[in-house]
Image (spheres, rainbow, N blue to C red):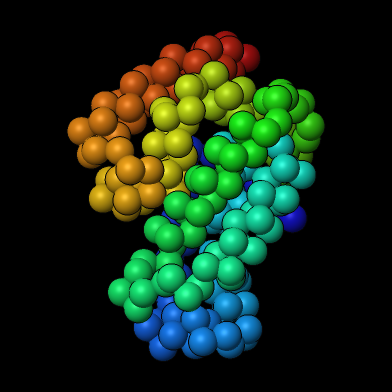
Amino acid sequence: MDVFRLTVLTSRSTQEEPSIGLIARARSGDDEAFRLIFNRFARPIISFIYDMVGKQETAEELTQETFVRAYRSLSTLKDDTKISTWLFGIAKNVVRESRRSLAREVDDSHISTMRDETQKPEENLLEKELDQVIKKALEKLDQDKRLVFTLKVFQQLSYEEIATITGYSIPKLKTDLHRAKAEMRRLISPYYGARDEL
């Protein structure tokens, strides 16, 4: 799947939240309704998980686990629940459980990217290079900072949504995000300095 582009400019999906009718249909066992939910949210969820774990294969497995758990717990979903917040919360728990059971490994594997076919080869090369720099910088953030950074910067969720997903207070999230951004700037700035010298 070409959904693993790491860029600070990643934007949140503009798709609408599923309607109450869709939620009700999925809760009553309508597999087509759940498929529609999956189609709308699979990309942002897999992107979020990839940002947290840094490995494509692991992100794919944990995304599958996220949607399996979501399907099994559909009966607990209320009509007024925001689907994206609910799914990100499940994904966060799946990632945490995975980290507890597996030793964390640093993977130097290739990052697949969604790219414009009209891009020049040198643009693709610079894009891949920046993806690697961002990936390595993300790996250096502690778990709380990486979580709030990926949800706020990459997924563009509100502080209220992130607080619901993480269980953290908004002041803590703002402090963690401020520190994460400062750390990311510090870690990425040498890359821009080196490029400017070329």
Regarding residue 141, the answer to whether it shows in the image is yes
**Residue at horizontal 50 percent and vertical 73 percent from the top:** 74
**In the shown orientation, is residue 100 left or right of residue 79?**
right
The quarter of the image holding the N terminus is bottom right
Identify the image quadrant of residue 99.
top right
The quarter of the image holding the C terminus is top right
Task: Give 75 or 55, whichever is nearer the viewer.
Answer: 75
**Residue at horizontal 71 percent and vertical 51 percent from the top:** 60
Task: Give 132 or 55, whichever is nearer the viewer.
Answer: 55
Task: Point out residue 184 in the picture as x, y percentages from the top left corner.
Answer: 45, 22
Task: Point out residue 102 in the picture as x, y percentages from the top left corner.
Answer: 70, 31
Identify the image quadrant of residue 41.
bottom right
**In the shown orientation, is residue 188 left or right of residue 123?**
left
Regarding residue 118, the answer to whether it shows in the image is no
Establish if 188 lies above or below 83.
above
**In the shown orientation, is residue 173 left or right of residue 187?**
left
Task: Point out residue 118 in the picture as x, y percentages from the top left corner.
Answer: 70, 54
Establish if 196 lies above or below 74.
above
Residue sitting at the far left: 171
Task: Point out residue 164 in the picture as x, y percentages from the top left corner.
Answer: 32, 51
Task: Give 182 or 77, whichever is nearer the viewer.
Answer: 77
